Image (cartoon, rainbow, N blue to C red):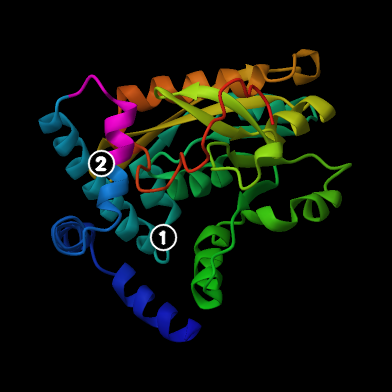
Amino acid sequence: MYYLMMFVSYGFSLLPFPVLYLFSDFLYVMMYYVVAYRKRTVFENLRKSFPEKTEQEITHLARTYFHNLTDMMVETMKLLTMSKAELQKRFKCDLTVLQELYKTGRSCQLHLGHNFNWEWANLFCMQGVDYPFLVVYMPLASKPADRMFRHFREKFGSILISAKDMRNAMARWHDKQYLIALVADQNPGKRRRAFWFDFLHQKTLFYKGPEMSARRNDIPVVFVDIRKIKRGYYEARLELAYDHPAQTQEREITGHFVNYLEKNIREQPEGWVWSHRRWKHQYIPGETEV
């Protein structure tokens, strides 16, 4: 099954971008109007996050989101045959802050959200820094699909770290310099491993892990914001949020990231993933930390 999937995906990725985006348009119609893929979840999330918006504005935002989602699908497939030069043409980011941190001999954490197109961002970053680049990911249930996506992500040299076995996987990096990308807006599986914060008008859980690791090891933290400039073109901005996390208070780094992420989402809401059940944990009044 894996080889069949790779054969089909490889042939698909050879298509030029204009043809790929025609296919994305077709996928959009199917997902939004025919299949209605998680459409109810998207509308529910948008209404609760933007109570000030009219129903017409929410509908427009949902449609734009689904179109961005299908664009990312075909753009991710394109990575199979996409050259470094093509990626650098379509994705821009000033990596100076990472290059300077590397010179100090210290490791670094990247904290980012599910903003399109994070797959391109991972590979772009890998090309421009001297760090070994670690990417934490959640393995897919389908083994052939998981193997295929690992191929995409490892194409230019990224080192994948399974979120299910992160402690053991990171042990070999204890005394080494590295750059690690952490998608810090994941929905926590267990409440005891998370902090509660106000986020987009809702009580929301965020993992403690990224902050705890940074504070414990005094690893600099860089926040990442990804924006879609136009179809097929993206730009990321890096912000050195904490040079010495060991000097911070508990919840400080995570709280700062939550505010940073919400600000960026409000500026380009159609670029964040709304089809996940991000708010499945219900807040208990008076609960501040669990």
Question: For the residue marked with disc 1, what is the amino acid?
Answer: Leu
Earlier residue among tags 1 and 2 = 2
Left or right: residue 84 compared with residue 233: right
Q: Residue furthest left?
A: 56
Q: Which residues are magenta?
A: 44-53
Residue 119 at x, y percent in the picture: 46, 50
Q: Is residue 280 above or below residue 161?
A: above
Q: Is residue 231 above or below residue 97?
A: below
Question: For the residue marked with disc 2, what is the amino acid?
Answer: Phe
Residue 231 at x, y percent in the picture: 23, 43
Specify the label residue 238 is tagged with.
Answer: none
Left or right: residue 148 compared with residue 40: right
**Screen quadrant of the C terminus:** top right
- 50 in the magenta segment: yes
Specify the label residue 43 is tagged with.
Answer: 2
> Which residue is drawn at the image coordinates 35% and 42% (left, top)?
274
